[in-house]
Image (cartoon, grey):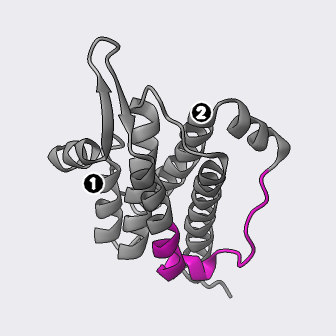
Amino acid sequence: MRREITQLLGRLEQVNIAGNGMSFNKAALKADIQEAAENLAESVEAEAASSRRPVLDPTMMALIDIDPVQAVVFSWKRLEAAMVELADRHNVWIDLRSARKSAEQLRQVGAISAEMVEVIKSLYSTYKSAMHSYDFALEKGSIVEYVLLTIESQDAIHKTLAKRAANHKPHTN
């Protein structure tokens, strides 16, 4: 996990030793979200996904307002579930303690593109920052963008799964 720790340390803005907390640089977190959006747009999986942006339901909007950390965590967990489903379909065991390794394993078996690996890594970085920061204070627009990107990534994975399943159906006469 050396790479993940180095990345987290590079994003640190403040460490509170007595309170055992960390605060991360908002610009770095926003850059991760922007990078995820760019990589998703360039991915093969995006071709399979809907061309319309998802609409957030009132419950998610309320969660973003009330508890942005939980909005990030919930969104990441949904994407993680899609990754597990994808791994199961490809008979690959993935270690969810490292999204970078999991995404690389999925890429190695041809389940996702290199661009989708980068999307997952960027989204995971924001998730980890939310989990480990005592002062996670991204503005609402960035949280909304994060949630939308996780939904779009999950949608892209599910539609890619469905497309591959349709292409591999046995022909019956």
Amino acid type indicated by mark 1:
Lys
**The image quarter in which residue 5 lies:** top left
Amino acid type indicated by mark 2:
Gln
Q: CA distance from mark 2 to mark 1?
A: 24 Å
Q: Element under label 2?
A: helix
Furthest-bottom residue in view? 173
Residue 159 in the magenta stretch? The answer is no
Quadrant holding the N terminus: top left
Where is residue 173 drawn, in percent x and y? Answer: 68, 88
Read off the residue under disc 1: 101
Q: Mark 2, residues whose alpha carbon is within 10 Å: few (<14), some, or many (≥20)?
A: some
Where is residue 31 drawn, in percent x and y? Answer: 43, 61
Q: Element under label 1?
A: helix
Read off the residue under disc 2: 70
Identify the residue at image location x=43%, y=54%: 27
Foreground tag (2 vs 1): 2
Identify the residue at image location x=82%, y=48%: 57
